[in-house]
Image (cartoon, rainbow, N blue to C red):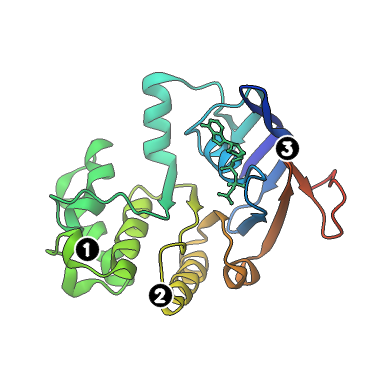
């Protein structure tokens, strides 16, 4: 599903990623954990094509993605990748239903089909009665669920989530973990999640540990095969 080979990244003289290799199988929920500054978000952004590596290769379902630029990259991202961030970045002037529909409208999909799928997703995410509400009229947990429906609208191959529970209380965080598992069971959805939340890491299928720009194994040694 996702294969990354020998990813390197520097910011100025700071070496942030020092040769990361990673493979993720379809339907896996994988968490990336590690201390602050280990390079987790940088890796997630590079794998999600939001940032570029200095060296290395990334393949999503056998398509090389790290060489895409401009319009083909924007189109690929819109059609194949979903993102969920700590701050959900919903558009305040649009209601929940519209926020979910926007990526599908951008992809040029038919309005009626888009609305049907968005309503179905929002119902699955227990937001049936909140379709017309603007983000500020929703709770933090509800806003995050709208962001997840938005990430799912184009049926992405993988969802990248950066601290998705970072802004939620423990009850909403737990509900979000259950939701990820439900989406994996129901749709075989693949997730790669950067998190400091130990409970979220514990319910993942696999946890990847990062330290100083490298993936390490459980005893802190540099891992060679992941
Ligand atoms: N755009 C940037 N320009 C310069 N340095 C950056 C940039 N983005 C990240 N860094 C630096 O790269 C290092 C890794 O950052 P990154 O955000 O990937 O860490 P992280 O493991 O996700 O940390 P945290 O858990 O605190 O979010 C940090 O030292 C950070 O200051």
Q: Which mark is residue 67?
A: none
Q: Nearer the viewer, residue 158 or 61?
A: 158
Name the spot of residue 109 as percent of width and height, x first. Answer: 23, 41
Name the spot of residue 21 as percent of width and height, x first. Answer: 74, 39
The residue tagged 3 is 20
Name the spot of residue 202 as percent of width and height, x first. Answer: 65, 71
Instruction: Choose mark 3 or mark 1, whichever is in front.
Output: 3
Marked residue nearer the N-terminal end (3 or 2):
3
Marked residue nearer the N-terminal end (2 or 1):
1
Q: Which mark is residue 119?
A: 1
Secondary structure of the residue carrying tag 2 is: helix
Please rate how many residues cluster around mark 3, counting C-alpha atoms within 10 Å: few if below 14, some from 14 to 19, many from 20.
many
Calculate the distance from the C-alpha at mark 3 to the C-alpha at mark 2. 32 Å
Image: 218 above or below 75: below
- Residue at 52% across / 70% down in the picture? 181
Pointers 3 and 2 in contact (CB under 8 A)? no
The residue tagged 2 is 172
- Residue 62 seen anywhere in this rendered image of the structure: no
- Residue at 25% across / 71% down in the picture? 127
Question: Residue 219 appears in which quarter of the rendering?
Answer: bottom right
Pointers 2 and 1 in contact (CB under 8 A)? no
- Horizontally, is 142 left or right of 131 in the view? right
- Residue at 62% across / 51% down in the picture? 36
Calculate the distance from the C-alpha at mark 2 to the C-alpha at mark 1. 21 Å
């Amino acid at each position: 599903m996702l294969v990354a080979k020998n990813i390197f990244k520097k910011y100025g003289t700071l070496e942030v990623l020092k040769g990361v290799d990673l493979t993720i199988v379809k339907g896996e929920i994988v968490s990336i954990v590690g201390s602050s500054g280990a390079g987790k978000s940088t890796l997630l952004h590079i794998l999600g094509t939001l940032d570029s590596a200095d060296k290395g290769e990334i393949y999503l379902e056998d398509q090389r993605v790290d060489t895409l630029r401009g319009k083909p990259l924007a189109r690929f991202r819109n059609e194949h990748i979903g993102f969920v961030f700590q701050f959900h970045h919903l558009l305040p002037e649009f209601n929940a239903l519209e926020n979910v529909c926007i990526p599908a409208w951008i992809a040029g999909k038919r309005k009626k089909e888009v609305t049907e799928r968005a309503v179905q997703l929002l119902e699955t995410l227990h937001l049936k009665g909140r379709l017309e509400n603007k983000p500020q009229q929703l709770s933090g947990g509800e806003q995050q669920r709208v962001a997840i429906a938005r990430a799912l609208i184009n049926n992405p191959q993988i969802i990248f989530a950066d601290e998705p529970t970072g802004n939620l209380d423990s009850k909403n965080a737990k509900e979000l973990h259950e939701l990820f598992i439900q989406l994996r069971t129901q749709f075989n959805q693949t997730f790669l999640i950067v998190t400091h939340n130990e409970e979220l890491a514990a319910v993942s299928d696999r946890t990847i540990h990062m330290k100083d720009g490298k993936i390490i194994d459980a005893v802190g040694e540099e891992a060679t095969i992941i």
